[in-house]
Image (tube, rainbow, N blue to C red):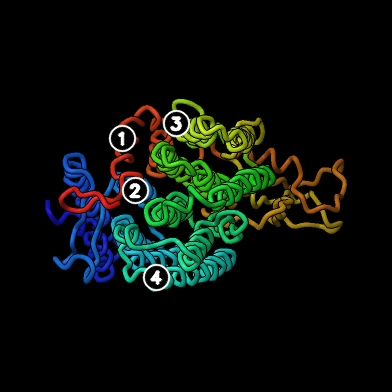
């Protein structure tokens, strides 16, 4: 299909607008239709890319310099395919997650708009159009975070908005300087007309600073943990797997396609690599200190983003650009699936148990075995163990560092894998520890005390309730994602003179024992859609390494050392 590139963007955009006019219950059907339509359009795009190599699509037939062109190469196609696959999994999960919730009326149009914006970003050849898309993604992310409806979510959304606006200002100033120096905004042609100098260097610095802020790279990560931890679980998965990758994708285009000589002749590459190394170490150590599951996963995202910026330190030699590009894009691909699965699994835990406190996960493996298994499988990819996609990405990055004899970067990448193993095993150890089965946890939130128990030193009537024991936590209180069931154990009519008065408000052991005895042996399990969508993405991350050869070959199509390719297959030098 000749118009497949533009239809990939138009389909979710039109579906989003249509969903605003129809009852919100029909929005999932529109989303499913877009999955089928865009999936079908990716097939001819793939076939054309394999047959003819990179190509441009002139929107409206205008073309450069009057119009905006789409440009598709191997890296762009991998990002399009990744977006489609992840949105399929997140959409499946969201069907069950938002069922019966008022937030569903807002979630599906926002998700479709995000899809259209991401596809446009990965296809456009215009750096100002990239800015417009980044602005749309920032505003849509703020709205998605706020869907949680809690004060913590509103605060996190506002912090994200301020960070996104700051990053957009820096990026826009950089784009304005690029245009003043070159007279064009088409990044394919910028490579041929833009000359190095103070103005170009300042433009690149501004653009990079804005993209670092939007990508939450250390030390500009202040907005990410709270935003990802307090958003609804599908939104957290979307932010961590796709949103932060959009800014990094633009950084790749800027440094490798528009300003390729800067990495080869300046200290910018090692400087960006040091920021990435700091993110790996700092984010991993902060993840180990967290007491909330979603906060741990959020700080893990800060750490994993560091690998993406270590790439710039490994691309200083022209002959190493393509291997390093293959490594970092494939790593981003595997990380997206693994991190989406982790956040979706955390959402199941939070909804089922009513919390995401790591200190209260004992017995979770008995209650939610598929979710704990998904944690382990996705964690294997984050650590970088075979045969996962994370193993292939990290192996290629370390191999590039060793071939360049850059032992420091190889050591940082190896230490990052060990630290990832530490916080992944922290989750698994807490979940598989012996303790009170989470089946009973929701039923112990409110326990009716027997009439003979007098905690306050005063007579109590039968049916009075005691508050659940307080839990000490260093982080903010986790929002409750599911209703808490109140349980009233049987009471006795006559007091027991052998039981003394107790001044603490905690429920007595006898009441807890009665509650555990009376609670059904098996509470209602989580929705199958939540469980199997999580499991599917986790297994994709795990098995991606076995299918790595063809994606790596795709990434090499249009690699920057050969230059962007225009119609007629001429190469721009």
Q: Which residue was labeled with disc 4?
A: 181
- Residue drawn at the location 42% of the way across and 42% of the way down: 318
Q: Would you call the spot at circle 1 few (<14 residues within 10 Å), some (14-19), or many (20 or more)?
A: few
Relative placement, left or right, of 76 versus 145 is left
Relative placement, left or right, of 227 versus 260 is right
Q: Is residue 562 above or below residue 548?
A: below
Is disc 2 placed on a helix, strand or loop? helix
Q: Would you call the spot at circle 4 few (<14 residues within 10 Å), some (14-19), or many (20 or more)?
A: some
Mark toward the viewer: 4 or 2: 4
Residue 553: mark in rendering? 1
Q: Is residue 156 above or below residue 409?
A: below
Residue 86, horizontal then vertical, whole percent: 36, 46
Residue 392: mark in rendering? 3
Residue 420: mark in rendering? none
Label 2 vs 1, first from the N-terminus? 2
Q: CA separation, marks 2 and 1?
A: 14 Å
Q: CA separation, marks 4 and 2?
A: 30 Å
């Amino acid at each position: 299909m000749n118009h497949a590139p533009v239809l990939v963007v138009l389909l979710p955009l039109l579906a989003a607008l249509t969903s605003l006019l129809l009852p919100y219950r029909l929005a999932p059907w529109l989303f499913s239709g877009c999955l089928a339509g865009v999936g079908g359009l990716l097939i001819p795009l793939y076939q054309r890319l394999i047959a003819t190599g990179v190509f441009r699509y002139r929107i409206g037939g205008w073309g450069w310099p009057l119009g905006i062109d789409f440009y598709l190469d191997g890296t762009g196609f991998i990002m399009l395919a990744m977006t489609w696959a992840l949105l399929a999994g997140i959409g499946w999960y969201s069907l069950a997650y938002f069922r019966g919730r008022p937030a569903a009326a807002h979630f599906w149009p926002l998700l479709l708009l995000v899809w259209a914006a991401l596809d446009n970003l990965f296809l456009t050849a215009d750096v100002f159009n990239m800015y417009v898309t980044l602005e749309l993604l920032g505003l849509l992310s703020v709205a998605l975070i706020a869907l949680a409806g809690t004060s913590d979510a509103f605060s996190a959304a506002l912090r994200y908005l301020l960070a996104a606006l700051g990053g957009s200002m820096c990026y826009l100033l950089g784009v304005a300087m690029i245009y003043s120096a070159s007279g064009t905004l088409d990044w394919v042609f910028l490579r041929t007309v833009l000359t190095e100098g103070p103005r170009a260097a300042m433009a690149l610095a501004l653009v990079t600073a804005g993209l670092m802020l939007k990508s939450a790279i250390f030390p500009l990560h202040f907005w990410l943990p709270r935003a990802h931890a307090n958003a609804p679980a599908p939104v957290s998965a979307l932010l961590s797997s796709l949103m932060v990758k959009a800014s990094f994708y633009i950084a790749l285009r800027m440094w490798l396609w528009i300003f390729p000589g800067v990495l080869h002749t300046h200290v910018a590459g090692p400087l960006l690599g040091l920021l990435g190394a700091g993110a790996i170490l700092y984010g991993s150590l902060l993840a180990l200190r967290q007491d909330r599951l979603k906060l741990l996963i959020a700080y893990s995202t800060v750490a994993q983003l560091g690998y993406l910026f270590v790439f710039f330190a490994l691309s200083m030699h022209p002959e190493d650009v393509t291997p390093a590009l293959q490594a970092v894009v494939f790593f981003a691909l595997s990380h997206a699936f693994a991190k989406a699965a982790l956040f979706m699994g955390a959402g199941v835990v939070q909804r089922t148990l009513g919390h995401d406190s790591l200190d209260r996960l004992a017995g979770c493996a008995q209650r939610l075995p598929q979710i704990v298994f998904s944690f382990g499988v996705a964690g294997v990819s984050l650590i970088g163990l075979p045969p996962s996609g994370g193993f292939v990405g990290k192996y290629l990055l370390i191999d590039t560092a060793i071939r360049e004899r850059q032992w420091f970067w190889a050591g940082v990448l190896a230490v990052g894998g060990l630290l990832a193993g530490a916080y992944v095993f922290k989750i698994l150890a807490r979940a598989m520890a012996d303790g009170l089965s989470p089946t009973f946890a929701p039923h112990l939130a409110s326990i009716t005390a027997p009439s003979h128990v007098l905690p306050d030193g005063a007579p109590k009537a039968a049916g009075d309730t005691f508050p659940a024991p307080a839990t000490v936590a260093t982080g903010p209180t986790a929002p409750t994602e599911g209703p808490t069931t109140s349980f009233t154990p049987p009471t006795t009519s006559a007091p027991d003179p052998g039981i003394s008065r107790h001044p603490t408000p905690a429920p007595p052991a006898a009441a807890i024992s009665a509650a555990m005895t009376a609670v059904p042996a098996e509470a209602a399990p989580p929705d199958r859609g939540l469980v199997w969508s999580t499991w599917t993405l986790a297994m994709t991350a795990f098995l991606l390494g076995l299918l790595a050869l063809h994606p790596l070959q795709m990434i090499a199509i249009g690699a920057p050392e050969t230059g962007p390719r225009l119609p007629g297959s001429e190469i721009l030098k």
